[in-house]
Amino acid sequence: MTHSTRARTIRRIRIRLIRAAGLLIVIAATSTLGYQLLASSSSSSTAAAQTEVVPGGHRGLRIERRLHSEHPGPLGEADGVVPDGVTVFDDDYPAVANLDPALLGALRQAAEDAAGDGVEFYVDSGWRSPEYQEQLLVEAISKYGSEEEAARWVATPDTSAHVSGDAVDIGPSDATAWLSEHGAEYGLCQIYGNEPWHYELRPEAIAHGCPPTYADPTHDPRVQQ
Ligand SMILES: [Zn+2]
């Protein structure tokens, strides 16, 4: 990705965030109407009931969080945020449940075999909503001080394999060490040299081994725009 293309991408995201924030303020200002619309548009009575119990329900919580996005805070589990101690078997978390079924199946098979070696796989991050990915990117730009450096670590919502459910970040280090040695047998491959925790499914690796890693995401053709 060229500098100018990346800068355009970041600008586009910023504009989208600003637009989203503006929209959310409008929604919040007309919250009573908004909640009524949410309730009346819910097709199931269960969803409508939940909306009444917690004003705005899930979407209301999201709106509140997004309104405070000038002070970046965690989004919710529904966006793919993962608390400590979640394993690849925890279907209750969207970060796990929304992963590509083939990737999840391979992970669980590997995790069962790793358990025999006394190693447990924890999911540090899995599927993410586009909103969560946007927040991570904005935070990375702030943390690394430039869009160029941030792009080495965090993809955009349009290009992230986490948003499509095709990537998982595994921990702790004994789990990634186990995967580094045995992952290819399950089609599980490290993709980026600078991210030993980030795994994706490469079914052909079972027969041919994992492909060489990219130094970092900026070298990945899928991430180029
Ligand atoms: Zn990752």
Image (cartoon, rainbow, N blue to C red):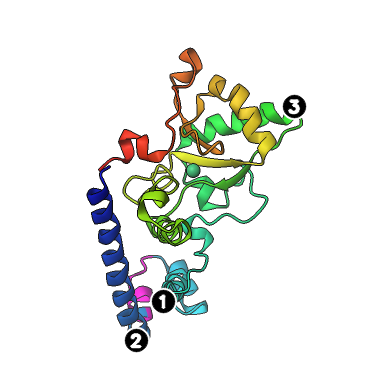
Q: How many marks?
A: 3
Mark 1 to mark 2 CA distance (whole Å): 11 Å
Which of the 4 image quadrants contains residue 139? bottom left
Where does the C terminus fall, quadrant-wise?
top left
Q: Amino acid at mark 2?
A: Ala
Q: Earlier in the sequence, mark 2 or mark 3?
A: 2
User: Measuring 30% from the left and 57% from the top, which residue is drawn there?
Assistant: 10
Comparing 57 with 146, the one in front is: 146
**To which residue does mark 1 refer?**
67
User: Range of the magenta residues?
Assistant: 35-43
Q: Amino acid at mark 1?
A: Leu
- CB under 8 Å between callouts 2 and 3? no
- Asked if residue 46 lies left or right of residue 182, the reply is left
Comparing 3 with 183, the one in front is: 3
Figure check: 72 above or below 124: below
Q: Amino acid at mark 3?
A: Asp
**To which residue does mark 3 refer?**
117
Figure check: 102 above or below 157: above
**To which residue does mark 2 refer?**
29
Q: Give the label, 2 or 3, closer to the camera.
A: 3
Q: Callout 1 environment at 10 Å: few (<14), some (14 to 19), or many (20+)?
A: some
